Image: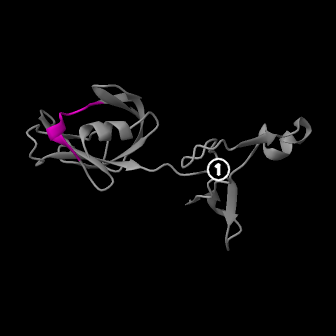
Amino acid sequence: MSLASIKRSIRVGTLLKLVRHDWLKPLVVNGNLGQTVVKPKIHVGLVRPVALVQSTQIALQGDNGLSYLPWPTSKNIRETAKGFEIDLVGFGEFKYVMEYEIVAPKLTHDSTICPHCQANLVGDPIPEEHREDFGGATHFQRQIGIERDHDRIEAYQCPDCKTIDEL
């Protein structure tokens, strides 16, 4: 996959999961009172949505605002099975890597758009006199909750494309 195709696959709202970062280790600071360990604010396993896509960089939304990831040159980024990895040194050798997986969005109870076919999942309006019975909701939901053996929703199905996403 080329840099251009990786860029095209990432849009605002895309979820990126950090799966490897060879430089992301706690920093030990020696001071007059001994050692202090400073831990990074991001960690492997963290999933963050893309908030901004520009020609030179993307911005990932975090708890403390946006963090920016500049697009590397084409020799310093490559496709992986589930996403992409970036050569942190910049020589295209990939000895020290930052790797992201693109997390596929799932259909949930709160979905208003199907992540698979982009169908609108907002149903008909709930009559005002019955809204209290539906927790104050103003519209019905079109996604189908699937119960199996446990008397609870275990998956949701899109009524249009029929895709089922397990919880």
Q: At numbered mark 1, what does the secondary structure look like: helix, strand or loop? A: loop
Q: Residue 32 or 102: which is nearer the viewer?
A: 102
Q: Residues within 10 Å of mark 1 (few under 14, many from 20)?
A: some
76 falls in the magenta region: yes
Residue at 33% x, 30% y: name it.
58
Residue positioned most to the bottom: 149
Residue at 70% x, 56% y: name it.
144
Q: Is residue 24 left or right of residue 132?
A: left
Q: Is residue 90 left or right of residue 8?
A: left
50 falls in the magenta region: no
Q: Which residue is mark 1?
A: 109
Coordinates of residue 106 in the picture (x, y in percent) = 53, 51
- The magenta stretch is 69-78
Residue 97 higher or lower than 150, as above or below: above
Quarter residue 162 falls in: bottom right
Coordinates of residue 127 in the picture (x, y in percent) = 88, 38
Residue at 85% x, 41% y: name it.
132
